[in-house]
Amino acid sequence: MKNNSLFVILFFVLILCNSCSNDDDSNQTSLVGTWELTSWNIGIPIDINNDSVASTNLLDEADCVNNETVVFETNGTVSFNSSYNPTFNISLIGETSETYLFDIQCGLEGTIGLAGTYEQNGDTVKILNNTATINGNQLIIVYQNAIDIYNEDFTQILIKKDLTLIYSKK
């Protein structure tokens, strides 16, 4: 009789553990799908397009084509399909001011692709060698010290800024 009771208890524990792992799988499923780039942010309000509205999102300011997407598959693979690849130089006007000069050139037409694997643990996603965070329907990747801010004659790096990319689920 004790063996039967022990068997019943173990059976319910296994069912409970299986239910918990299914919850993790449903979190994983929320990541699966296509995410599009909606913000390319370096934390500096700029008005490159001269519309009298400054934005920290370069996508709002630069007239470059943006079709960048990230696609997460159920099998743990991720692919980046990118056409947003501007080349830009930023300089600080006077080493103590908050005024910047931007020189942005849009990338060539075409698509750059990259594929790899990902692992999700709750709201954190490890993509290739980077870590992203899920916040609602946004996927946020921060590349620390990725942007160089130069002096006026571009001979010296004065500041390094983080680049924050935000993708929204389609």
Image (cartoon, rainbow, N blue to C red):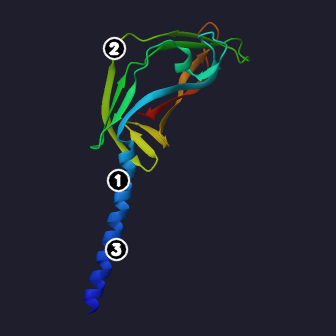
For marks 3 and 1 on the same chain, the one whose residue lies earlier in the sequence: 3
User: Residue 69: where, in percent of width, then height?
Assistant: 38, 28
Quadrant containing the N terminus is bottom left
Note whether 133 is above or below 41 in the view shown.
below
How much space separates mark 2 and mark 3, taking CA atoms? 54 Å
Dot 1, how many residues are within 10 Å of its Cα: few (below 14), some (14-19), or many (20+)? Answer: some
- The quarter of the picture where residue 131 lies is top left
Q: Amino acid at mark 3?
A: Val
Quadrant containing the C terminus is top left
User: Residue 165: where, in percent of width, then height?
Assistant: 49, 29
For marks 1 and 2 on the same chain, the one whose residue lies earlier in the sequence: 1
Dot 2, how many residues are within 10 Å of its Cα: few (below 14), some (14-19), or many (20+)? Answer: few
Query: SS of the residue at dot 1?
Result: helix
For marks 2 and 3 on the same chain, the one whose residue lies earlier in the sequence: 3
Q: Which residue is mark 2?
A: 110
Q: Which residue is mark 1?
A: 25
Q: Which residue is mark 3?
A: 13
User: Residue 58: where, in percent of width, then height?
Assistant: 55, 20
